[in-house]
Image (cartoon, grey):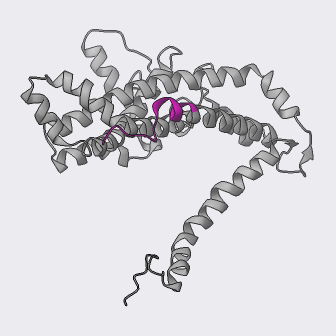
Amino acid sequence: MTVVSNSPPSRPRGDGRLAALFVAPALLGFVVFLLWPTLRGVCLSFTSFNLLTPAQWVGLDNYVRMVHDPIFWDSLRVTVVYVVVNIGVQTVSALAIAVLLQRLTQSPVLRGIVLTPYLMSNVVAGVVWLWILDTRLGIGNEIVAGLGLERIPFLADETWAVPVIALINVWRHVGYTALLLFAGLQAIPNDMYEAAKVDGASEWRMFRRITMPLLRPVLAVVLIMTVIGSFQVFDTVAVTTAGGPANATNVLQYYIYGAAFGRFQFGYASAMSVALLVVLSAITFVQYRLTRAGQTDLG
């Protein structure tokens, strides 16, 4: 009589070691460049540390100072304004580009063109747009003047500075975001669109009733990623306005950098960094729950 075993086949002993070998470099990088600096920053947030003398324990003094610091709250407000403009314009633009790529053409050449600005570093993009938008010599203001309008100090005016910086980063990142959404659109069965067309549905109706509901999990993850990235804006501000004019673009990351490397207040800078970490964690949790990012409507 033949005995049939229902137990899963045994795994070779060497597989676990091989897997650990492949995971080890990434795990080492995570511990050295992410976990340890995070824990070190949390510890420093409870100290007074200027890099030249040993850290002195001050308890919650840095957090009390942060709560009563008007510049911190103003920097947080500026950051929120930047995030709202950046995420709003970038998400709508990326979604439109992704839908056009999916519905009209899937040419890899066009995908490459859309992604091109993302291949440029934030510093280079900031410098290029700083030249383009220069009030006197920039080609952008030359066009404005050619239209008979008064030159606009895009990066030197308190009203224009934050939206312009947000749009610069939209220009750089929108292609990458669009390709992420385009990949999500590829998972939607084309049969649904064909059936909707047979029923006489318009493109707009198919977008509302098919595309958006089925794209929701991917869109939710993309929103979480872009919001986290937007709150960490730094290099574009550093090379274009340096926090000016009159602290109009003094985003939180730039204020933290100034406190740490400008005034050597590493303890206070660490406290603000921990506060930013808590804010981002809370926002991510709320986004994840509200958008149901872990669920899909695809059967």
Residue 13 makes an appearance in the image: yes
User: Residue, x 71% and y 57% (percent of image)?
Assistant: 36
**Magenta segment:** 286-299
Q: Is residue 158 magenta?
A: no
Tell whether 73 sits left or right of 11: right
Residue 297: in magenta span: yes
Quadrant location of the C terminus in the rendered image: top left
Q: Is residue 223 above or below residue 151?
A: below
- Residue at position x 19%, y 34% in the image: 100
Quarter holding residue 69: top right
Asked if 61 appears above or below 74 in the picture, the reply is below
Whether residue 274 sits left or right of residue 221 in the image: it is right
Residue 147 vertical placement versus 137 (above, below): above
Location of residue 26 in the rendering, given as x and y in whole percent from the top left corner: 55, 65
**Residue 204 vertical position relative to residue 257 in the rendered view, above or below:** above
Q: Residue furthest front?
A: 1
Query: In the rendering, at what x and y percent does residue 119 appear?
Result: 36, 49
Query: Which quarter of the picture shows residue 281?
Result: top right
How many numbered circles are shown? 0
Q: Nearer the viewer, residue 50 or 84?
A: 84
Q: Position of residue 264 (x, y in %)?
A: 79, 42
- Residue 231 is situated, as x and y percent measured from the top left of the image, at 56, 33
Residue drawn where x is 23% and y is 34% of the image: 99
